[in-house]
Image: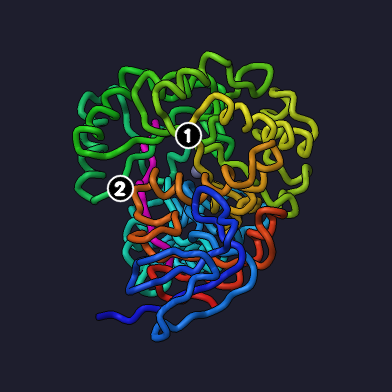
Amino acid sequence: MRSRWALRVGRAFDGARFRPGGATVVVEGERVVGVEEASFALPGDVPVTDVAGTLLPGLVDCHVHLVGSGSFPGTPGSLEWAGGAAADAVDAVVVASLREQVAAGVTTVRDLGDVAYRALSHRGRHAEGLPRVVAAGPPVTTPQGHCWFLGGAVDVHDPGALDRAVAERVERGVDLVKVMASGGFLTPGSDQLGAQFEAAHLRRLVDRAHAAGLRVVAHSHSVVGAEVALAAGVDGIEHFTCLAPGGAHAPEALLDRVAAADVTVCPTLGNDPSRFPPVSAMPPHILQMLERLGISDRDEHFARVAAGSLRLREHGIRVVSGLDAGAMPAKPHGHLWRSVAELVRGGWPVDEALATATSVAAADCGVEAGRLAAGRLADLLVVDGDVAADVTALSRPSAVWVGGVAVMQ
Ligand SMILES: [Zn+2]
């Protein structure tokens, strides 16, 4: 029999709620085999470690780009760099990104856009103390469309192109398919307010993926892109910024339909404001877009976006947290705590905000983690302080385990 060990802590969040009696978590091999109150008397042969702070399931970041490094200060171009870099240079960035994530207590990442399937090739390395990886490979996009430089562009006028795009990903063994339903800020010339695909084309992609047992998530910054994605039957919408001429606002009817369709939304909230380039260094196409959208004050804009996240909750939409780590310097790997903190700033209860980065996120990624519960993977995180009282305590990890193996302690 493999040996058992236990962690005992006065404060614990179990993936859905805080446990008033704290927790004693018993681990055997890679799994949790029991969760009791902190006062529980364990058999004498089970070694117990008492920890201070708050124990949680390891965090799950539902939207990362492992091929993008946060260490390109002042430039938004880390994904463009990856598109043109040699495989070994890209692999070095992927491993560095994974190390930054796990050191921050993120024990599962969902990669929603790599190049040449490099993120995918780093799946299954959790025995080495790296996070679990769920990956989509290169995102499907249009020629010169959003993130075309990652190599996933398809010409929809070629009748077999979408089928081949799905077949290639199935052959590579992706965990899900990512498609760019609208343009994006990082790709000059793409239309953040428009739709990149017609619904019929996107529907074909979704049907082919579903037939192969793969879920599809769609990037959309625009209302029309979200409408097309919804009509096509996607399983998740990323960003869901809901831009339209005049600004960002999700129409009530759209929110109702997203909830009714059981579509997951990952609003990719959170930025490290100290890593934004000065306005003088912003690319002209981004400045023009901000002006077109009437966004003049960055802080005020993000406060409004955080407040808007409460409408997702009010409409009963399933929300998962993902930072979009690696996409730009203001979104470094390991900063998922910022996504959770933004939900709380927007008015979400702390336990529900934490669930978007633990139990709900793990379920959406198809990973048996995200909960302190018998049978779940022993992906665990201890942070300094009381997360219930101060959600930013999430940014202070003191111990991390992946599959019962201590990564940091
Ligand atoms: Zn992204």
Q: Cα distance, mark 1 to mark 2?
A: 20 Å
Residue occupying the far top of the picture: 253
Give the residue type that dot 1 points to.
Arg
Name the residue: 61% across, 26% down.
Answer: 311
Q: What kind of element bears circle 1?
A: loop
Residue 265 in view of the camera = yes
Name the residue: 69% across, 36% down.
Answer: 347
Name the residue: 20% across, 28% down.
Answer: 160
Q: Is residue 13 magenta?
A: no
Locate residue 342 relative to residue 64 in the image: left or right: right
Mark 1 or mark 2: which comes first in sequence?
Answer: 2
Q: Main secondary structure of the magenta part?
A: loop
Give the residue type that dot 2 points to.
Asp
Which corner quadrant holds the N terminus?
bottom left
Residue at numbered disc 2: 175
Name the residue: 49% across, 60% down.
Answer: 58
Which corner quadrant holds the C terminus?
bottom right
Residue at numbered disc 1: 318
Q: Nearer the viewer, residue 56 or 406?
A: 56
Label annotation for residue 9: none
Residue 75 in view of the camera = no
Image coords of residue 27 (percent x, y): 39, 72
Image coords of residue 106 (percent x, y): 51, 60
Q: Residues within 10 Å of mark 2 (few under 14, many from 20)?
A: many
